[in-house]
Amino acid sequence: MFDLLLDFRNKLFKFEFEDVIKVLWALWEKQNRHWSNMPYMNGTKLLEWVFSKNPSPTTKMCGDSNPHSALSSQQVRWLAPPEGVICTHGNVALKPGKVGVGIGFVWGDWCGNLISAGMTFLPSYCTVAVAEAWAIFEALKALLNNETRSFEIRLDCKMVVEAVKEKEN
């Protein structure tokens, strides 16, 4: 998969590559929900959701302009981290009763620009909480060693978020 991403990165413009990452992430999420027997979107509906949730490069605003000014109160948008802060979103895919966990993460900045992304496979059986913790670990490993900006970690596993908050106190 990494070779495929490198091919895309070398052959596409940055905004096209970011769209590829968005679509791959959406497919990852769809498969994760499918395996978990949860409702999921197909085809056009999935792509419309991906591109409405993530700002396109032609409409992306950063700095003094307010990207949320034209939004209706019904629309759900990505919440950017504070200016100057980068953020990682991690997620996992596992099939109950099967050995192996797919782990994915995306690093982005406060403008929604992609910094890096990665996926890995953990060939063992584990709980969702342990897998989500591995997603944090993999994302932090992928962060550049010379990175000095503050960062946020965002997960959808409340148990792991609460455990991290408890350790901070």
Image: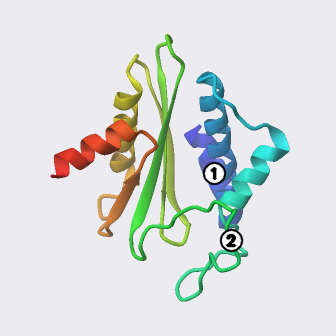
Residue that lies at the very extreme toward the right in this rendered image:
44
Label 2: element kind: loop
Q: Amino acid at mark 1?
A: Ile
Q: Would you name the residue on which mark 2 appears? A: 57
94 and 162: which is toward the camera:
162
Residue that lies at the very extreme toward the left in this rendered image:
169
Label 1: few (<14), some or many (≥20) within 10 Å? many
Circle on res. 21 = 1
The image quarter containing residue 57 is bottom right
The answer to whether 79 is drawn above or below residue 5 in the figure is: below
Residue at screen point 66% across, 44% down: 26
Residue that lies at the very extreme toward the front in this rendered image:
73
Query: In the rendering, at what x and y percent does residue 16 appear?
Result: 72, 61
Residue at screen point 62% across, 37% down: 28
Query: In the rendering, at what x and y percent does residue 14 appear?
Result: 65, 65
94 and 166: which is toward the camera:
166
Q: Is residue 168 left or right of residue 103?
A: left
Label 2: few (<14), some or many (≥20) within 10 Å? some
Report, in whole angstroms, how far the alpha carbon at label 2 lies from the one at label 1.
13 Å
Check the picture and name the quadrant holding the N terminus: top right
The answer to whether 10 is drawn above or below residue 124 in the figure is: below
The answer to whether 69 is drawn above or below residue 95 in the figure is: below
Q: Is residue 160 left or right of residue 11?
A: left
Label 1: element kind: helix
